[in-house]
Image (tube, helix red, strand yellow):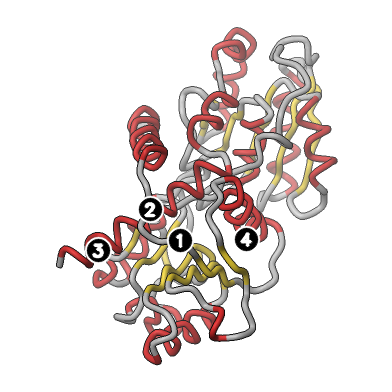
Amino acid sequence: MKNIVYIYLFVLTFITSIQGYSFNHLTIINEPCDRGPGCVVRSLMDGLRKLNMPFNHNPTDLTQLADIVVILSDASNVKKAIEWKKAGYIKHIFAGPNLVTRSYECDYLLASPEIDVILVPCDWARINFIQDDARLTDKIKIWYAGVDETYWKPTTNKKSGKGNNVLIYAKYADQHFCNQIKNVLAHDGWNPVTLSYGNYNHQQYKALLTDSAFALFLSVSESQGIALAEAWAMDVPTLVWNPQELVAYGKRFDPISSCPYLTDDTGLDWKTVSDLENHLKIIKRQLSSFNPRKWILEHMTDTKSAQLLLDIIQHTITSEVKE
């Protein structure tokens, strides 16, 4: 499965790197946001700047709207864009990825015929959206945010020599489980340092990654996992708890993942404590075989992400012309 993801992303990013675009301006709209959604906005705008693709952000004048509008967050913005399209102010709507959790929300808004493409961060999100509303099958495209590889970069290329520090990134995991994992690491000779989601800034996270031999992530699910990508850009491999079970928002999500973009280059996943213990028995020998930063540079920088979105837009427009 990891190799399939690797090949899929390689093909997409190769295609986008050589293809031109028939449009020359975008409008990006989102509500103020932080953490993951905020990182998506930053990544897209920085990626477009690096590609010299003109865009405007949250224009207040309808005459400033580009023909192509990307709605990153808030379903109310999608409703506005639908009215703009009906009135002739815009031609295309690309909506996502931070809009709804279940695709039927807001009275099946995403099924509106005015929306050209629904953007989701990964394949498991796509499948679950379609399970809720099969009409979306041909409208959903996978688009993931990137990271700034010039900021998230290691100070040394040596994966060894970082001592026994291991960063535990705890997100939506109960304290008892966190303590259990800390004890497992300590028993194996590692020095665990815990970072709780929402209680740190980039500088703190980067400093902890710099001093960590690897990072261990505790999260029930991730639609992309931007913090994972930031660790990989720092050349820090990850051991990710991937329980593959989630019941929330009135649904048993299946499939589900805590690490949809994990590959052999970026780390390992584990489901049970026993799985983790087995990984720890050989992890020191494996550290030099991981290449997480190389994977990020090839697939998930801001530029690669922006190229992927531009390719999706170009393909959509070209398909409409052919029809």
- Residue at figure coordinates x 36%, y 27% from the top left: 3
Question: Given this view, does label 2 or label 4 mark the residue nearer the observer?
Answer: 2
Mark 3–mark 4 contact, CB under 8 Å?
no
How far separated are the C-alphas under marks 1 and 3? 25 Å
* Pointer 3 or 4: first along the chain: 4
Residue type beneath disc 4: Pro
* Pointer 1 or 3: first along the chain: 1
Mark 1–mark 2 contact, CB under 8 Å?
yes
Residue 114 % position (x, y):
34, 80
Residue named by callout 1:
24
Is 171 rendered above or below residue 134?
above
Marks counted in the figure total 4
How far separated are the C-alphas under marks 3 and 4? 25 Å
State left or right for residue 104 relative to residue 187: left
Question: Given this view, does label 3 or label 2 mark the residue nearer the observer?
Answer: 2
- Residue at figure coordinates x 61%, y 56% from the top left: 45
Q: Residue 138: give its label.
A: 3
Residue named by callout 2:
21
Q: Residue 142: give its label.
A: none
Q: Quadrant of residue 185?
A: top right
